[in-house]
Amino acid sequence: MIPQGRPAVSESDIARLAGVSLTTWRRQHAEAFRAHVPDLLPDSRSRLYDRAQVEAYLAGRPIPALPQDEHPEDLLSAREVADLLGISTGTIRAYAATGHISPGTTVHGSRLWSRREVLDRRDNAPGRGVGGGRRAGEPQGPRKSHAYEGDPRLDVAREALATAGGAPKGRVAAELAAVHGSTPRTWERLLTTAAALQDNDPDGG
């Protein structure tokens, strides 16, 4: 997580601030640095650090603590988003690719989402429990043509069918569940729906 209002820097930035090359930084300084300054995104490929903590470390000052309170504008990693929504990071990527959530904000190569957006998605997901779907007093929208209409997982199921090579549906569903979350039974329903839609519209029109 990158706390609201706290600029983050990469190891390339840190090397520049220290006045050395990135290679020298990683070979001679990074190990000691990482023992004192926490990575803001430990579950991400990119190492990012709080600039105020970095500057304090380089100046030999006490390292200031990060904010402890949650803020709506904190930026969360895919893993943190997945944990809040109770799904896998693969499903987060599928949601972002299909517009189910926003593409997020890219910071030094890492895609992040605001806590505000994630909590809004969690608490107001269409058709998902309390707070989801149509609010009291709102007019009912058009009836869905099938249970998974608008669900980005349906695109994942279509792609899986296209590459399954005749594998049993149960095996494909189990693999999808392991990668993207939800239960194998749910993925079997999604695969069945995707196959029926394909049969009804083989040209994808």
Image (tube, rainbow, N blue to C red):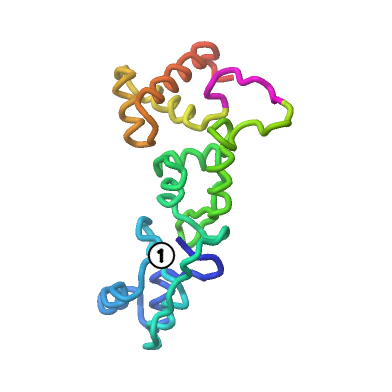
User: Percent x, y for residue 49?
Assistant: 41, 70
Q: Nearer the viewer, residue 200 or 104?
A: 104
Residue found 35% across the figure and 78% down from its top: 21
- In the rendered image, residue 201, in percent from the top left (x then y), is placed at 55, 14
Q: Which residue is painted at 43% across and 79% down in the image?
A: 64
Tell me the residue at 57%/29% (across/down).
150
Q: Quadrant of residue 181?
A: top left
Q: Secondary structure at mark 1?
A: loop
Please name the residue that numbered disc 1 is placed on. Answer: 40
Q: Residues within 10 Å of mark 1 (few under 14, many from 20)?
A: many
Total residue callouts: 1
**Three-letter amino acid code of the residue under disc 1:** Leu
Q: Nearer the viewer, residue 164 or 151?
A: 151
Q: Position of residue 66 (x, y in %)?
A: 45, 71
Q: Is residue 106 magenta?
A: no
Relative to residue 57, is residue 80 depicted above or below?
above
* Quarter the N terminus occupies: bottom left
Instruction: Assign the C terminus to one quadrant of the image.
Output: top right
Identify the image quadrant of residue 22: bottom left
Q: Residue furthest top?
A: 200
Residue under the image location 36 percent in, 29 percent down: 183
Q: Is residue 67 left or right of residue 171?
A: right
Image-quadrant location for residue 41: bottom left
Start-end of magenta stretch: 140-149
37 on left or right of 75 = left
User: Is residue 18 left or right of 124 when viewed as pictured?
Assistant: left
> Which x, y percent locates residue 158?
45, 24
- Pick the front one: 82 or 33: 82
Residue 167 higher or lower than 153, as above or below: above
Magenta stretch prevailing secondary structure: loop
